[in-house]
Image (tube, rainbow, N blue to C red):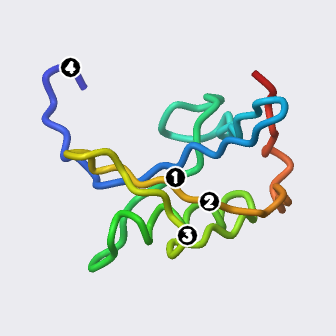
Amino acid sequence: MAGEMLTPIPAASVIVLRDAPVEVLLLRRSDKSSFVPGAWVFPGGAIEANEEMRDAAVRETFEECGIALDPQRSCRPRAGSRRSAFRSDSTPGSSSPESRVTST
């Protein structure tokens, strides 16, 4: 593995925040995962062929934790950023027992 060239995989992640008090959504990866097993991560994953980053972020968030983000209600990203922000009135409702809402 040392010195091995890795091919980057385009991916999108979402940071889901809820205020009063501030909460951050993190998902715990399976201990059997080949990539960062057991790590706490933001929802996200690979961008599919011909898919925009924003659409991938919305899809991955729904697939992983059941939160439906509306890309039409997204916040404007900062100038020069490749990031987007979304607004959602959804409450986390996950089909995965690994999902948690963690207070900060």
Res 27 visible: no
Say if mark 3 contacts mark 4, CB within 8 Å: no
Of the image marks 3 and 1, the number of the one nearer the N terminus: 1
Of the image marks 3 and 4, the number of the one nearer the N terminus: 4
The tally of labels here is: 4
Compute the Cα span from label 1 to label 4. 27 Å
Res 10 visible: yes
Give the amino acid at mark 2: Arg
Q: What residue would you read off at disc 1?
A: 44
Position in image of residue 28 (x %, y %): 70, 36
Q: What residue would you read off at disc 3?
A: 73
Position in image of residue 53 (x %, y %): 35, 63
Q: Residue at x 19, y 46 (%)?
A: 7
Residue 2: mark in rendering: 4
Say if mark 3 contacts mark 2, CB within 8 Å: yes
Asked which secondary structure carries label 4, the reply is loop
CA neighbours of label 1 inside 10 A, class few (<14), some (14 to 19), many (20+): many
Residue 88: mark in rendering: none
Q: Is residue 19 above or below residue 92?
A: above
Q: Residue at x 27, y 80 (%)?
A: 50
Compute the Cα span from label 3 to label 2. 6 Å
CA neighbours of label 3 inside 10 A, class few (<14), some (14 to 19), many (20+): few
Q: Is residue 68 above or below residue 97?
A: below
Q: Residue at x 64, y 46 (%)?
A: 16
Asked which secondary structure carries label 3, the reply is helix
Q: What residue would you read off at disc 2?
A: 87
- Left or right, 2 with respect to 11, comes to left
